[in-house]
């Protein structure tokens, strides 16, 4: 958890606010995102009904190749469940490339797995490119080290 908190602090992970009034800030968050996690609350119908609204934002602002993951949170509240797993699976299956899983932030269930899988999927899409500048630097560093002449003994102190 600490790792993800630090990643968020560094701006590698951003948490957008769910409220409408923050939509203008949120749109900026989508640009350049390599992966997007859409979280709804399995006990709250309205959070699931909001998903098409978030998908519209994603279609409008996010890159087409951003990884998409739908997460049903609060799995620890199974007795209050309002959205079935099947309903969410159906929603995700209609969106190209969208994965789905359920989690509990409270119990720390599937939290690491979600982010690790997302990072893995993002990295597997990235070409294994070494920027040419870095490459030339590494070639230079592979040159044999110049030979250092053996250290000369310090000049003897002359005494009177
Ligand atoms: N039982 C339970 N409660 C949770 C879980 N995750 C979050 N909560 C609670 O749900 C409430 C809302 O959590 P937030 O993290 O603020 O939700 P959010 O989606 O970021 O809300 P927005 O700021 O509107 O986007 C808080 O009271 C949390 O403590 C969970 O997995 N289980």
Image: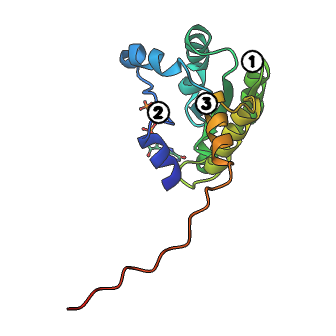
At x 75%, y 18%, the residue is 95
Q: For mark 2, what is the residue? A: 15
Q: Earlier in the sequence, mark 1 or mark 2?
A: 2
Ligand 1 within 8 angstroms of badge 2 C-beta: yes
Tell me how far mark 3 sits from mark 1, CA to CA.
39 Å
Quick one: label 3 or label 1, which is nearer the N terminus? 1
Q: For the view shown, which residue lies furthest in the left direction?
A: 160
Question: Where's the C terminus, which quadrant?
Answer: bottom left
- Residue 63 to residue 122: above or below: above
Question: Disc 3, ligand 1: is the CB inside 8 Å?
Answer: no
In this view of the protein, which residue sits in the foreground, 13 or 82? 13
Left or right for 118, reference 4: right
Label 1 element class: loop
Q: Give the x, y percent position of residue 73.
A: 59, 40
Instruction: Tell me if I can see residue 49 in this picture.
Output: yes
Q: Alpha-carbon distance for marks 1 and 2?
A: 22 Å
Above or below, 47 against 151 in this view is above
Where residue 111 sits: x, y (%)? 61, 48
**Could you tell which of marks 2 and 3 lies nearer the N-terminus?**
2
Q: Are marks 1 and 2 in contact (CB under 8 Å)?
A: no
**Residue under label 1:** 95
Name the residue nearer the viewer: 93 or 150.
Answer: 150
Q: Residues within 10 Å of mark 2 (few under 14, many from 20)?
A: few
Q: Residue 118 in the image: x percent, y percent?
A: 68, 37
Rendered image quadrant of residue 97: top right
Q: According to the image, label 3 marks what residue?
A: 133
Q: Residue furthest bottom?
A: 160
Frontmost of labels 1 and 2 is: 2
Density class for disc 1 (Cα within 10 Å; few <14, some 14-19, many ≥20) is few
> Which residue appears at 39% of the width and 18% of the height?
25
């Amino acid at each position: 958890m600490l790792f993800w908190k630090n990643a968020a602090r560094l701006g590698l992970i951003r948490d957008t606010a769910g409220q409408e009034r923050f939509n203008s800030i949120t749109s900026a968050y989508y640009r350049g995102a390599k992966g997007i996690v859409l979280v709804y609350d399995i006990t709250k119908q309205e959070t699931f009904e909001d998903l098409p609204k978030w998908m519209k934002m994603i279609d409008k602002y996010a890159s087409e190749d951003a990884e998409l993951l739908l997460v049903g949170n609060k799995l620890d509240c199974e007795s209050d469940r309002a959205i079935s797993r099947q309903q969410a699976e159906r929603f995700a299956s209609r969106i190209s490339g969208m994965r789905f899983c359920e989690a509990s932030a409270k119990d720390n269930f599937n939290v690491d797995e979600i982010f690790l899988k997302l990072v893995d999927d993002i990295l597997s899409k990235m070409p294994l490119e070494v920027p040419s500048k870095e490459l030339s630097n590494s070639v230079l560093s592979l040159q044999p080290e110049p030979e250092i002449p053996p250290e000369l003994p310090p000049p003897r102190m002359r005494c009177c």
